[in-house]
Image (cartoon, rainbow, N blue to C red):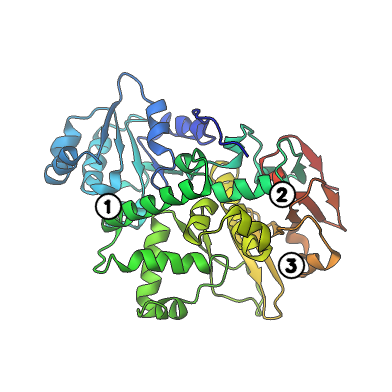
Amino acid sequence: MDTPALKPYSRLLEPRVREALSDTPVVLIAGPRQAGKTTLVRQLADAKRRYITLDDELTLQAAKHDPVGLIRTLDCATIDEIQRAPELLLAIKKTVDEDRRPGRFLLTGSANLWLLPKVTESLAGRMETLTLLPLSQSEIHATRTNWLDHVFAGQLPTVTTPLIGESLIDAVLRGGYPEAVLRATPRRRQAWARQYIDALIQRDVQDVASIDRLDQLPRFLEALALVSGQLCNYSQLGGQLNMDHKTASRYVGVFEHMYLLDRIAPWARNPLNRVVKTPKLQFIDSGLLSALIELTPAMAQQDRSRFGHVLESFVHGELRKHASTAERRYRLGFYRDHNQNEVDVVIENPQGLIVGVEVKASATVKASDFRGLKQLASLAGDQFKMGVILYDGTQTLPFGEGLWIAPLSTLWGEAAHTAP
């Protein structure tokens, strides 16, 4: 597959940001480093909005030593990488309480600010947070259909840009970080990923946590990559690096705050007393995950099981991105019980309706592959909206009441099949 041409991608979050700026004093765009936050806020710039970045050392020192003085000079501003100087947030609170004009401050942050001290009380009710993750396949292929909104409306998008076989492997291993998307070979993407992780650990970790042994973090992240998609056993993870389970849990939290991975809670409906309560780990970007485990296209072709774990993270990441721009709120979970019935992703809407998604790296789907979805459907009853197996194929077909098979490429499709 050819390297995508260098171009400015249209971000699906942009209309949401503009909407928030029209009625909210402070808007935060949060997400991982190099996901495109700075590019997006620069596209939103106008003559009255001053731009400052806290990656500039002089500006950072001014923000830390005299936050009130710095904010006093700003009437309308974009502040990039706000997590580097959380001292500014109290000063922002003071000025917006005096002048609540909408859109005064557009912030970006590469860490979950709500988990930093004093943020909740300082900007609660004054700030809207929007999440910008690495490029989705919809953004790469310039489609706008939201898969989550459509499946809960009883529709499955139609494939417009089919990716199967080697093309699908390339897309999964490439991931969505703009710089990585443009790299021509897996080796170059892996080089970028290594530098990216080193920069995060050396520069950004200390903004969200005080960690004495930074040298442990790269090895721990690699250990997490090997168990992506599996239940999170902190004692086992910590034991690999001679750390206790509390330290392991804390380190997982640090990577989660930096939008590298998610801890996925199991779906449960009372009274379900056989559902495993342990969360599952998923990396948000399949390209970064592939680089960490050094998975090449040739290896993915030969070892479909190994590729399947990365493909599951890819689907999780795509659904997470759809959730950030959907018309409604959705919660992503998973289902697994003690009889080993499982569903890779369980999506729940505010009314409690659920859609189950199974991910297959194969072009063949068997009736037995629906075992977990059928169990989920029987437990959920009237809450069960649809069950879908996303597979490496081209056809969308019904497979029983409320059950479907659909190409993975429907995740970035356009028009829709109406499900009966």
Compute the Cα span from label 3 to label 2. Answer: 29 Å
Which quadrant is home to the N terminus? Answer: top right
Image disc number at residue 203: 1
Residue receiving disc 3: 376
Of residues 4 and 374, the one nearer the viewer is 4
Amino acid at dot 3: Leu
Image disc number at residue 380: none
Say whether residue 305 is left or right of residue 396. left
Q: Residues within 10 Å of mark 2 (few under 14, many from 20)?
A: few
Residue 143, image x and y in percent?
64, 33
Compute the Cα span from label 1 to label 3. Answer: 44 Å
Residue 225, image x and y in percent?
49, 64
Amino acid at dot 1: Arg
Q: Secondary structure at mark 2?
A: loop
User: Does residue 380 appear in this view?
Assistant: yes
User: Does residue 347 appear in this view?
Assistant: no
Of residues 188 and 403, the one nearer the viewer is 188
Q: Secondary structure at mark 1?
A: helix
Q: How many numbered tags mark residues here?
A: 3
Q: Earlier in the sequence, mark 1 or mark 2?
A: 2
Residue 217, image x and y in percent?
35, 65
Q: Quadrant of residue 249?
A: bottom left
Q: Residue at x 50, y 28 (%)?
A: 7
Would you place residue 132 above or below residue 292 in this image?
Answer: above
Amino acid at dot 2: Gly
Q: Residues within 10 Å of mark 3 (few under 14, many from 20)?
A: many
Would you place residue 272 above or below residue 139 in this image?
Answer: below
Q: Earlier in the sequence, mark 1 or mark 3?
A: 1
Residue 116, image x and y in percent?
31, 56
Q: Residue at x 69, y 70 (%)?
A: 342
Labels 3, 2: front one: 2
Residue receiving disc 2: 165
